[in-house]
Amino acid sequence: MMIQNGITNMVGLIDNVMVGSLGTEAMTAVSIVGQLIFVFNLAVFGGLSGPGIYGAQYFGQGNTEGFRNTFRLKLWISGAVVIGGIAVFLLGDETLIGLYLRGESTDVDPVLTMEYAKQYLFIMLIGLVPFAMTQIYASSLRETGESLKPMIAGVTSVVVDIVFNYLLIYGKFGMPELGVRGAAIATVLSRFAEFAVVVIWSCAAKKKHVFLIGIYRRLTVPKELSVMIIKKGLPIFFNEFLWAGGIAALTQCYSVRSLDVIAGMNISNAICNLLNVVFIALGSAVGIIIGQTLGAHEYEKARDDAFALMKFTGVICIGLTAVLVSVSGVFPGLYDTTQEIRQYGSWFITITALFFPVQGFLNALYFTLRSGGKTMVTFLFDSVYSWVVPVPCAYILCNFTGLSVLLIYTIVQAADIIKLIVGYILIKKGVWISNIVDASEK
């Protein structure tokens, strides 16, 4: 999972640098749309997470039909999220993009940025369906312990994206020079390639992935199970959606200081996202491993594994901090932009890196709580906290104080230490230890 996510984010990094060579407006436009698409992606992940909790425990229990039902429910949930996402983006395109273009700048043209952003967004909408379908298959495979196929599909996606980015952004080998639109087309093509690989390969190995046998003969899911999973999963969906929305809101708060800040954050996010896949993948692995262990009724082992994996994640993230700090002064130089924006990028990279251990530990805490079905706890722990503490803090400090945006960014990052302390107490008390699939069958 770490390799797959790393490869996927490497694509994002390469896209970012390639588009960055077109100028600050193009880079900023792609960054803004990327922030909006990120909210959609997290909504898909959140929608699949509820069935995923049951899927991991059903697999640990050896209940194939139960696992099939979680897959079918994922299809319905993803369909609803995709329809809703496309409607929101089509109806609110200029309004959503305009939220990030309110700051002043002598170096960034907001009108040109809006034009680029709309071009990029409308093409990216085509890739939402294959992205959602890929996540359905990939998440189900991971719940069975199969992470190779999603990884290979991710590698294929990267190759397609890099090749067509080069061809279509710059107009190489007889292809049209499309700039920002070329970057969007390349990304959409990579989505379809990833979808084709993971689905075709999985279906060709039905003897191994027996849950796929007859999976589409019916799409109905038992009402009692659907209600139970949806009740358990809704807090996760809203948590992921609101958490991603909180990140978007934070970025919007910072943007009121200047459009240069958004461009600098884009540079920082490109390299930081490449490395944060480590603790994100470790967190996902924690959820699957602990979920399977709980499904097998090995509660003491689940507790021991949870603490061991959390400590391991924290240590790994200290190493990532050192890597990011070491490249913070060099990486922004890859972009064709102003020196001020490069300096913003360098400082944002450094500050983000210093809090990597906190974020890694928090991610492991979150997935441990979620593995036992404590979705309401994770909802309060994650997204509610984000909207109650960091977002208001950033809004007030950005709009009503003269503090520098870099100091504000540091203060907001530090606020997560409170969440870390609360989460650790919950884990230590063992409130998350439960077998939810046994309860669903009573």
Image: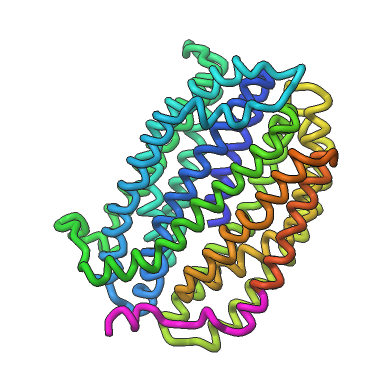
Tag count: 0
Q: Decide which of 80, 67 is in the foreground and name it.
A: 80
Which residue shows up at 80% across the image and 48% down it? 351
- Spot occupied by residue 180 in the image (x, y as percentages of width and height): 54, 21
Tell me residue 314's x, y (percent): 71, 66
For the point 61% across and 21% down, the residue is 26
In reply to whether residue 438 is colored magenta, the answer given is yes
Provide the residue span drawn in magenta. 424-442
Residue 14 position in % (x across, y down): 62, 33
The quadrant in which the C terminus is found is: bottom left
* Image quadrant assignment for residue 228: bottom left
* Residue 18 visible, this angle: no
Residue 161 sits above or below residue 308 on the image = above
Image vertical order of residue 349 relative to residue 147, above or below = above
Name the residue furthest left. Answer: 217
In the rendered structure, the answer to whether residue 338 lies left or right of residue 381 reads right
Residue 88 is left or right of residue 73, and the answer is right
- Indicate yes or no whether the magenta region holds residue 82: no
Residue 259 seen: yes
Above/below status of 157 relative to 220: above
Q: Is residue 24 above or below residue 151?
A: above
Residue 7 horizontal/vertical position (percent): 56, 45
Name the side, left or right, on which 208 lies relative to 432.
Answer: left
Name the foreground residue: 175 vs 133: 133
Q: Residue furthest front?
A: 400
Q: Residue at coordinates 59% horizontally, 31% vertically from top-left?
A: 99
